[in-house]
Image (cartoon, rainbow, N blue to C red):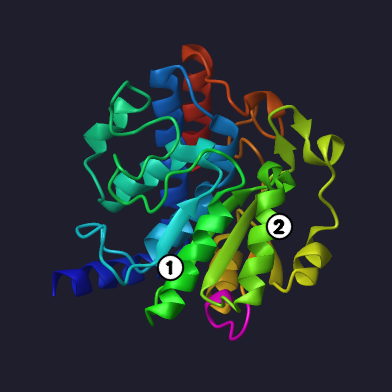
Amino acid sequence: MHALRETKTRDQQCKTILELQQKARLIRRTALQMIGAASSGHPGGSLSCADILASLYFCLLNVRPSEPKWPDRDRFILSKGHAAPALYATLAEAGFFPKEKLSTFRQVDGMLQGHPDMKKTPGLDMTTGSLGHGLSAGVGMALAGKILRRRYHVFVLLGDGEVQEGQVWEAAMAASHHKLNNLIAILDRNKLQLDGATERIIALEPLPPKWRAFGWRVREIDGHDITQIITAIKGAKRAKDRPTIIIAHTVKGKGVSYMENRYEWHGKAPGAELLAQALKELEENA
């Protein structure tokens, strides 16, 4: 009965796009506060994926915060593990653990490590951070779901820089071979990685035909448009015979003027003055 009440609550939050936009803004603010307090972390990619995380955890995922290991829950893998502050902010807001724990980010032996550790944090389905491995783990979870006749879906959020990793394409090939229609990948296509533009370092485009050639359904969306995110994921869940990738075009550092489209903010914490400016901008643009 308690679980049913939790599901209804998420459905109710799904009624307005405005609520989800507010959740995304809160995730951005909290993630920056965590990074600022730790003087370490990855703000750019945390800000670019906030709208996707808000849509998933407050509208689309079938999960129970009070029962993180519920066998029939949807699985979520943050393959771009360096965006952990955004995921931690989301999990705390959803009720997986107390918000007070957010202040322990990046502390030695703390619950919230610099990259996701499933042994330490409630609500995490996979330990990530070594880029390129998340989709392979997702393939295993999705295949297990098929074998065990579970009805859950597996979601994997990829960074575009990590799509340069060969293991991603091995996993893509295996997913289509096994017709894993319960596997949905979302690519945070902010077009920047640690040292610059993805297209300058190792060009990725044209991405849609590459994924189609590997046997996937492909959908391209604006990754900051909540309506497009929800529509694309609901469509992917209806797929009959193959996995889906949603290429979500985003802005690295979204919402903070001095971080937007600047690769220098991939993995650098703002000082006190710049943090205050960032939080002010996010508040004023609410």
For residue 226, side relative to residue 90 (left or right): right
Dividing the picture into quadrants, the one containing residue 198 is: top right
Residue 32 pos. (x, y %): 46, 29
Report the residue at 55% width, 61% height from top.
226
Residue 124 pos. (x, y %): 36, 50
- Count of all numbered marks drawn on residues in the image: 2
Residue 60: mark: 1
Report the residue at 74% width, 45% height from top.
164
Is residue 261 depicted above or below 58 in this figure?
A: above
- Amino acid type at image mark 2: Trp
Magenta-span inclusion, residue 271: no
Dividing the picture into quadrants, the one containing residue 60 is: bottom left
Dividing the picture into quadrants, the one containing residue 27 is: top left
Work out whether residue 15 can be spotted. Answer: yes
- Amino acid type at image mark 1: Leu
Q: Which residue is mark 2?
A: 169
Quarter holding the N terminus?
bottom left
Magenta-span inclusion, residue 238: yes
The prevailing secondary structure element of the residues shown in magenta is: loop
For residue 145, side relative to residue 259 (left or right): left
For residue 165, side relative to residue 112 (left or right): right
Residue closer to the observer: 94 or 237: 237
Highlighted range, magenta: 236-242
